[in-house]
Image (cartoon, rainbow, N blue to C red):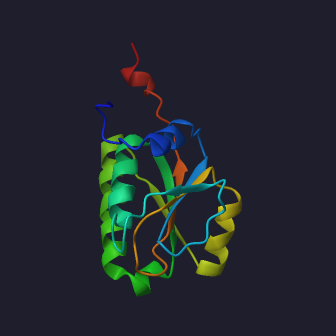
Amino acid sequence: MRKGTLLNGPLTALVGDLGHSDKIMIVDAGWPIPADLRLDLCLTHGIPRLTQVFATVAQELSIERVIIDAEMQKHGPEVHSEVLRIIAAAGQDQGEAITIDYEPHDTFKHHARSVKGIVRSGECIPYCNLVIVAGLAFTPRDRRP
């Protein structure tokens, strides 16, 4: 059994397969997902929350940028606040700020064509969707052996 934070095998494989600038989406329970990209974690309404999935992935992955569905601010302000907290904490842990972008829902939907995977949470608040852009986990020159 893995000792790390992330225990879900398919999600661990997806995160482990990401290279610099590869993208994954974490979406609400209603997002339409093609079968070849679907990683379904939804158990029931609200379980797991989008923020729980995101926080776990953020502990395992170097993140360069997060693109947030702009409608989240209006429809899920409590989710949005928690997403911002997770981003700030992840940036602090990796020693550099994570860029945050917002895109209107109609523009945001187009990311589904270029991601390595789409993770469906149990989030039942509409428009609670985000894209994670993988960063680099290289050791800075001043800390190399």
Q: Is residue 131 above or below residue 16?
A: below
Residue at 56% of width from left, 54% of height from top? 24
Residue toward you, 83 or 129: 129
Quadrant in the picture for the N terminus: top left
Q: In the figure, is residue 76 to the left or right of 15? A: left
In this view, which residue lies farthest toward the bottom?
74
Residue at 30% of width from left, 68% of height from top? 82
Q: Is residue 135 above or below residue 75?
A: above
Is residue 3 visible in this depiction of the protein? yes
Residue 27: % across, % down: 50, 67
Residue 100: % across, % down: 47, 63
Is residue 62 visible in this depiction of the protein? no
Q: How many marks?
A: 0
Residue 84: % across, % down: 35, 66
Quadrant in the picture for the C terminus: top left
Q: In the figure, is residue 36 to the left or right of 82? A: right
Residue 121: % across, % down: 43, 64
Q: In the figure, is residue 52 to the left or right of 14? A: left
In this view, which residue lies farthest toward the top?
145
Residue toward you, 15 or 88: 15
Q: Is residue 111 above or below residue 93?
A: below
Residue at 39% of width from left, 23% of height from top? 142
Q: Give the image quarter of residue 128.
A: bottom left
Q: Give the image quarter of residue 111.
A: bottom right
Residue at 49% of width from left, 79% of height from top? 127
